[in-house]
């Protein structure tokens, strides 16, 4: 039993403690995906340039995982056709640009 516990403990030490849920996704292509698939809907909902979606007072997102889940939901709703890697890029962009969540 002790060897199993030692093995588990050693594997946990190597895991990153505070990795973003989107890993090392690049926010630059995320901005391009966002601008192409998201902005028109956000402008329709909030006016202006649509950024109020992210900056309004009663926003519902409060963690990095919330951002990634919302991006996945929007991807499905607007049928953007993004792969999970592209959803991750958009989430990384939104966090960098608007949310600045650290977990």
Image (cartoon, helix red, strand yellow):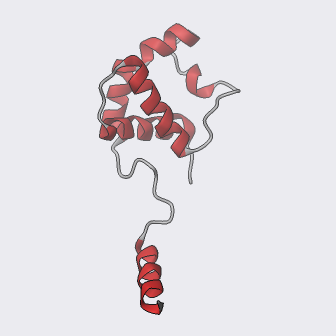
Residue drawn at the location 61% of the way across and 27% of the way down? 55
Measuring 65% from the left and 24% from the top, which residue is drawn there? 56
Q: Is residue 54 above or below residue 67?
A: above
Looking at the image, residue 73 sits to the left or right of residue 60; the answer is left
Q: Nearer the viewer, residue 72 or 18?
A: 72
Q: Is residue 30 above or below residue 37?
A: below
Q: Residue furthest front?
A: 1
Residue at left 33%, top 39%?
Answer: 84
Quarter that holds the C terminus: bottom right
Q: Quadrant of residue 81?
A: top left
Q: Residue at x 50, y 60 (%)?
A: 18
Between 72 and 36, the one nearer to me in the picture = 72
Give the number of marks. Answer: 0
| Extreme-bottom residue of the structure | 2
Q: Nearer the viewer, residue 69 or 67?
A: 69
How far from the left and from the top, in percent, is residue 7? Answer: 41, 83
Query: Residue 92: horizontal and vertical position, in percent?
Result: 42, 41
> Is 25 situated left or right of 77 in this image?
left
Res 27 → quadrant? top left
39 is higher (above) or lower (below) than 27: above
Residue 58: x and y in percent read 70, 27
Image coordinates for residue 3, horizontal then vertical, percent: 42, 90
Q: In the displayed structure, does residue 87 sit left or right of residue 51? A: left
């Amino acid at each position: 039993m002790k060897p199993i516990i030692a093995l588990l403990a050693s594997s946990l030490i190597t895991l990153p403690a505070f990795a973003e849920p989107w890993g090392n996704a690049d926010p630059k292509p995320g901005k391009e995906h966002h601008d192409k698939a998201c902005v028109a809907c956000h402008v329709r909902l909030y006016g202006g340039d649509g950024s109020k979606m992210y900056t309004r007072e009663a926003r519902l997102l409060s963690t990095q995982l919330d951002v990634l889940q919302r991006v996945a939901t929007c991807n499905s709703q607007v049928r953007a056709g993004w792969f999970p890697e592209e959803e991750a890029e958009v989430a990384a962009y939104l966090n960098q640009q608007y949310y600045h969540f650290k977990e």
